[in-house]
Image (cartoon, rainbow, N blue to C red):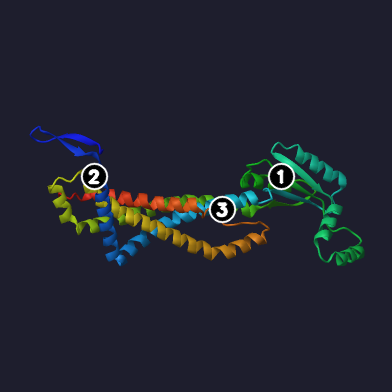
Amino acid sequence: MAKSTKSRSDKGVERWQPQGSYLRAWLADHARVASDTTLFVSQRMLSSLLVWLMVGVALTLPGLLWIAHSNLQTFSEQWQGNAGLTVYMKLTASDAAVADMAEGLRQRVNIARVEVTTPEQALQQMLAQSGDSEFLRQALVAVETNPLPASFAVVPDSGASFLALEALRRQLLAESGVDDVVIETTWLERLRDLSDLVSRVGAGLSIMLLLSAVMVVFASVRIAIESRLGELRVLALIGATPAQMRRPFLYFGSAYGLGGGFVAIMLIAVFLNQIEAPLLSLAVSYQVGVQIAGFNPAFLLVMLLLGWVLGVLGALLALSQRSPSA
């Protein structure tokens, strides 16, 4: 037996209404608005595509920045060389001078580790890594001296900035017996600083683009509603609820926002496909295995959700500017 609810008429007479009738009417109204929205968008496909493209372009930059940030973190974690210094001693430096330099470096409070490479160890490493080791051996026999100096691999404490490494480099260059000091992985430190700068600038640009996407949806929804303003006024006269008056706005905004999110996903996919080959080639040249990460189902869902949110915000803005009774 169907449940029923009690309602009171204007004259105070109670009447019974089936509870399921409200749910059926609510679903029927949603279906009607969805059908009208689909018909309107499909009949104006060119203008709809332009709106989706503008919203998609506005979403593409934040999406690309997120993927770039995720992959840069992965790249930094896979990089095997810690930022540090390589100190090369002069060829005339004695073993005692090399030992004193190593001990002095180990006693510094900001140094985590010091690895000494003697001239003999450096020569053996060079011969092992060279395919022409026999030729080099013959050349060294002819020279009768080892042309390689002693060196130190100096690893500072974690979190040392490039400025701290540069200051340490200048201090070591002033030491007697030191020929040269090289900051290792300097390019990686500069890349991180550049990435931080790009992220901050990109964040500002992303905010402006997202706001522009909201305004695009706002203008598009307002134009779409103008063609149905007479119908909405009739609905207002016959007693339509505020939710029923908002529904066409929200459906138009959702359609434009979701379409823009889908276009953004396609644009990001095309962009990543274009840069994947040269990026992998660059990573291989630095002996780092990198696979583009971040473009996964969770990212796709977030892009669609973000597009929907922008569409709804634009629709609410259009609703606040254009009342059906105006």
**Mark 1 or mark 3: which comes first in sequence?**
3
- Whether residue 219 can be seen here: no
* Position of residue 7 in the picture relative to residue 46 (left or right): left
Q: CA distance from mark 1 to mark 3?
A: 25 Å
- Pointer 2 residue: 243
Disc 3 crowd, CA 10 A, few/some/many (<14, 14-19, 20+): some
Residue at 67% x, 62% y: name it: 285
The three-letter amino acid code for the residue at tag 1 is Val
Q: Evaluate if marks 3 and 2 touch, with contact meaning CB atoms under 8 Å apart.
A: no
Q: Nearer the viewer, mark 3 or mark 2?
A: 2
Amino acid residing under circle 3: Asn
Instruction: State left or right for residue 51 relative to residue 10.
Output: right
The percent position of residue 304, horizontal first and vertical second, equals 41, 53
Secondary structure under badge 3? helix
Residue 258, position in %: x, y?
37, 55
Residue 155 numbered tag? 1
Q: Secondary structure at mark 1?
A: strand
For label 1, the crowd category at 10 Å Cα-Cα, with few meaning under 14, some 14 to 19 and many 20 or more, is many
Of residues 292 and 211, the one nearer the viewer is: 292
Residue 168's mark? none
Q: Amino acid at mark 2?
A: Ala
Residue 310 seen in the current view: yes
Q: Quadrant of residue 48?
A: bottom left
Q: CA distance from mark 2 to mark 1?
A: 65 Å
Mark 2 vs mark 1: which is more N-terminal?
1
Residue identifier under label 3: 71
| CA gap, disc 3 and disc 2 | 44 Å
